[in-house]
Image (spheres, helix red, strand yellow):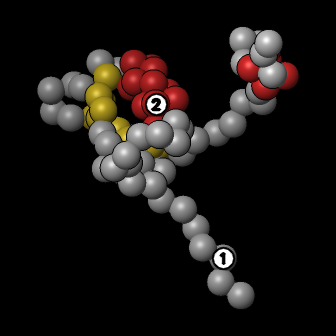
């Protein structure tokens, strides 16, 4: 018998879009390079800006998994 969590895993709840800042630039060869600001060690490239955004979205989904070792993340510490 499946638990309620397991039975809901197949469903696709509607998630609100969120903005993820990224940095990009165009190289002399015409390719666009960039990285997600939360993961500055992991660059990717695209043939144009739309292609780069697609690559960055793939990285975002991959790096959002908690089970990936060695992925450095940037966060903010609130100091009172």
Precedes in sequence: disc 2 or disc 1: 2
Q: Quadrant of the N terminus?
A: top right
Is disc 2 placed on a helix, strand or loop?
helix
Which quadrant does the C terminus fall into?
bottom right
Q: Please name the residue that numbered disc 1 is placed on.
A: 78
Q: How many C-alpha atoms fall within 10 Å of the one at disc 1: few (<14), some, or many (≥20)?
A: few
Q: Position of residue 62 (x, y in %)?
A: 46, 30
Determine the CA span between mark 2 and mark 1: 27 Å
Pinpoint residue 61: horizontal percent, then vertical percent: 52, 29
Determine the image quadrant of residue 48.
Answer: top left
Q: Position of residue 71 (x, y in %)?
A: 38, 48
Left or right of 2? Residue 48 is left
Few, some or many C-alpha atoms within 10 Å of disc 2 (few <14, some 14-19, many ≥20)? few
Q: Secondary structure at mark 1?
A: loop
The residue furthest left is 29
Q: Please tell me which residue lies in front, 54 or 41.
A: 41
Residue positioned 48% across, 51% down in the render:
38
- Say which of 70 and 37 sits in front: 70
State which quadrant residue 27 falls in: top left
User: In the rendering, which numbered label is found on residue 57?
Assistant: none
Q: Which residue is at a point 30% across and 39% down the rendered structure image?
A: 43
> Residue 53: in sight, yes or no?
no
Q: Is residue 7 left or right of residue 72?
A: right
Q: With respect to residue 49, does 38 lie above or below?
A: below
The residue beneath circle 2 is 62
């Amino acid at each position: 018998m499946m638990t309620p969590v397991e039975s809901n895993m197949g469903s696709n709840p509607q998630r609100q879009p969120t903005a993820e800042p990224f940095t990009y630039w165009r190289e002399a060869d015409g390719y666009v390079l960039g990285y997600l600001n939360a993961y500055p060690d992991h660059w990717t490239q695209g043939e144009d800006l739309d292609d780069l955004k697609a690559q960055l979205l793939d990285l975002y989904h991959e790096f959002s998994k908690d089970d990936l070792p060695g992925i450095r993340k940037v966060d903010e510490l609130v100091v009172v």
